[in-house]
Amino acid sequence: MHEELTIVKSRAERLEKEKKLLEAAKDLGVSLDIDGNTVSMDSDSASNLMMVKDMILAFSRGFSPEMARQLLNEDYSLVVININDYTKSNKRQIQLKGRVIGRHGLIKEKLGKLTMCSLRVYGKTISIIGQYEYASIAESGVEMLLKGMNFESVFKIVGNKVKEAYINHGRDS
């Protein structure tokens, strides 16, 4: 199987220097070729190829190599929300990014802690890495913020969803 991913040139250049990411891909049987800002990936395993693709996408969206490598664990997922889906206006996109980040990064930090996820705002995207169920909850929280919902209401709803997920997860064990 073959996949290609186009990423920002500066991140592609950094990726070439990230030995641990390159080794992690190789260990999963995925060969990488970086040419300019295009990353080509080949593997016999579709699932390994998708995990490596998500890892590289996460790195290209501003996550650290360590955080991106978490996506090689099947319990973790990457969610990428495109701000263009909420507005085409550049001015409004800046406002929406600011709304998700919050003053001094407090909103993004609080949402991340509440959902046990890591969030990055990069370019016109908001990306989330976390355990599958919690990443989904963080995604809904970000979407509520982007739609203009009151901060405290968002945190209350997200907090309740996290508690419910935690209780349900405990029952499944």
Image: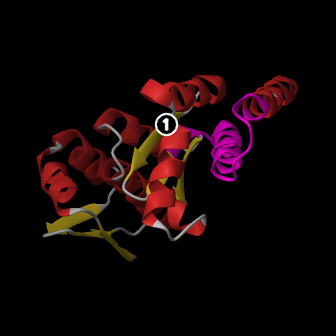
Task: Identify the residue shown where x is 33% and y is 33%.
Answer: 66
Q: Which residue is mark 1?
A: 101
State which region is magenta. Answer: 128-154
Q: Nearer the viewer, residue 171 or 56?
A: 56
Residue 34 located within the stretch drawn in magenta: no
Evaluate whether residue 61 shows in this view: yes
Question: Measured from the top left, where is residue 163 in percent x and y?
Answer: 81, 24
Q: Nearer the viewer, residue 90 or 65?
A: 90
Q: Residues within 10 Å of mark 1 (few under 14, many from 20)?
A: many
**Quadrant containing the N terminus in the rendered view:** bottom left
Name which quarter of the figure residue 85 lies in: bottom right
Name which quarter of the figure residue 86 lies in: bottom right
Q: Establish if 129 lies above or below 171.
A: below
Evaluate whether residue 73 shows in this view: no
> Seen in the image, is 17 located left or right of residue 23?
left
Task: Identify the residue shown where x is 71% and y is 40%.
Answer: 137
> Seen in the image, is 31 located left or right of residue 171?
left
- Magenta segment, prevailing SS (helix, strand or loop): helix
> Count the marks: how many?
1
Q: Establish if 135 lies above or below 169.
A: below
Residue type at tag 1: Ile
Mark 1 secondary-structure assignment: helix
